[in-house]
Amino acid sequence: MTSSALRPDTGPVLRDFGGGPFGIYIHVPFCATRCGYCDFNTYTAGELGTSASPQSWMDALRGELRTAAEVFGALPGPQPDVSTVFVGGGTPSLLGGDGLAEVLDAVRANFTLAADAETTTESNPESTSPRFFERIREAGFTRVSLGMQSAAEHVLRVLDRTHTPGRAVAAAREAKAAGFDHVNLDLIYGTPGETDADLDASLDAVLAAGVDHVSAYSLIVEDGTAMARKVRRGELPAPDDDILAARYERIDARLATAGLSWYEVSNWAADDSARCHHNLGYWDGGDWLGAGPGAHSHLGGVRWWNVKHPARYADHVAEGGLPVAGWEALTAEERYTERVMLVVRLRSGLPLGDLDPAGRGAADRIVADGLARVDRDRIVLTARGRLLADAVVRELLT
Ligand SMILES: C[S@@+](CC[C@H](N)C(=O)[O-])C[C@H]1O[C@@H](n2cnc3c(N)ncnc32)[C@H](O)[C@@H]1O
Ligand code: SF4
């Protein structure tokens, strides 16, 4: 497909915005080193050589945002203000405070940010400092998400993380001191060799940091990663499902006691303002533009994704179009499947009225099995249901 298919005059697809929130995701495809478990679209300087650099990426990003604003501006009806911006990666903090300020300026130059827009950047603890946080706060960012993963040195080593155990908490404190009210720490649990005591130490550290948001992900051994090769060769054990379930329960209990409640199966927040509204937009069927190499976008039931490699991405932008690798218009059935998969994971629950007759029958069985309850005509996962969320989704969709 060429990018012209996204143009309303020549293409069949983009008709209008879906009427919900509109977010912008920006993908920064650079990391200092590659963590053995990670299969995100990111590259080290050695992997890129001279084919792409943060400067060429920034130039291409500006071009993509400019073209996207033209395409969206040509759609009928009013263009909504941008309610959330999320700069993710990769390692956005490798751009430095000035680089991230340029990114937000490029968004503002092409789109109108809502007055109360949530603007987040991911950051790796080792590439941050008090000055970095002051600079990005001054630039207009309102939220920081830090990849902590664990407080245990041996766990960080298995994950190939380069920061020292105390650095993530120190970075969270520096962000708060710079004026950030909203700070997230990401944890990974179930890493081979992690003990219950290691997890407790990580939770102690998270709670001592006083952040208002935590994301905790069970370790996924992704195909094609260095970690998957180690597991296949027997050098590392695969994460154990029973241990993962017990760790999840422990995380949920300790965070809840400290006043952080779950609002999505893997996410906890102190209150509504602390939630990641950008991610809520993804989960609730909102519209978003994904800019940068490999980024995915969604607008009014049409999804498209960008060329993955930073050098090819920049080439496409230089040719003057959107750097699109492929697109699809979701069928009603696909939209239904996605909605069930994503919304049932939210604490606010899935309206029973959204389910088809087979889904209603499945919901009755799921409730009878104690995996969900019905609250104001919505199906909401119980604690056990959250552990088996994937199975619940499969049942609802059979
Ligand atoms: C892709 S990273 C980007 C942000 C930043 N570079 C970092 O590592 O913190 C976002 C988060 O995804 C999670 N993640 C990435 N790969 C994962 C995997 N294989 N299993 C579980 N969590 C993973 C980590 O918690 C990480 O903080
Ligand atoms: S720093 Fe983050 S994005 Fe980069 S390789 Fe590690 S987990 Fe992936």
Image: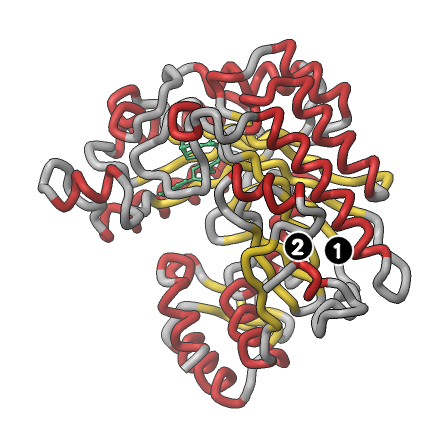
Pinpoint residue 138: horizontal percent, then vertical percent: 77, 19
Q: Is residue 274 toward the left or the right of residue 129 in the image? A: right
Is 170 above or below relative to 114?
A: above
Question: Which residue type does callout 1 highlight?
Answer: Pro
Name the quarter showing ligand 2. Answer: top left
Quadrant that contains the N terminus: bottom right
Contact between labelled residues 1 and 2, with CB atoms less than 8 Å apart: yes
Pinpoint residue 95: horizontal percent, then vertical percent: 59, 22
Quadrant that contains the C terminus: bottom left
Q: Residue under label 2, please give it.
A: 281
Say which residue appears at 31% left-offset and 48% top-offset.
222
Q: CA distance from mark 2 to mark 1?
A: 6 Å
Q: Is residue 246 toward the left or the right of residue 82 in the image? A: left
Circle 1 Cα neighbour tier, 10 Å, few/some/many (<14 / 14–19 / ≥20): many
Q: Which mark is residue 21?
A: 1
- Most extreme residue toward the right is 78
Pinpoint residue 66: horizontal percent, then vertical percent: 78, 43
Is 392 above or below relative to 114?
A: below
Say which residue appears at 51% left-offset and 35% top-offset.
29
Q: Nearer the viewer, residue 46 or 295?
A: 46
- What count of labels does the image hold? 2
Mark 2 or mark 1: whose residue is earlier in sequence: 1
Residue 40 quadrant: top left
Q: Is residue 332 toward the left or the right of residue 321 in the image? A: left
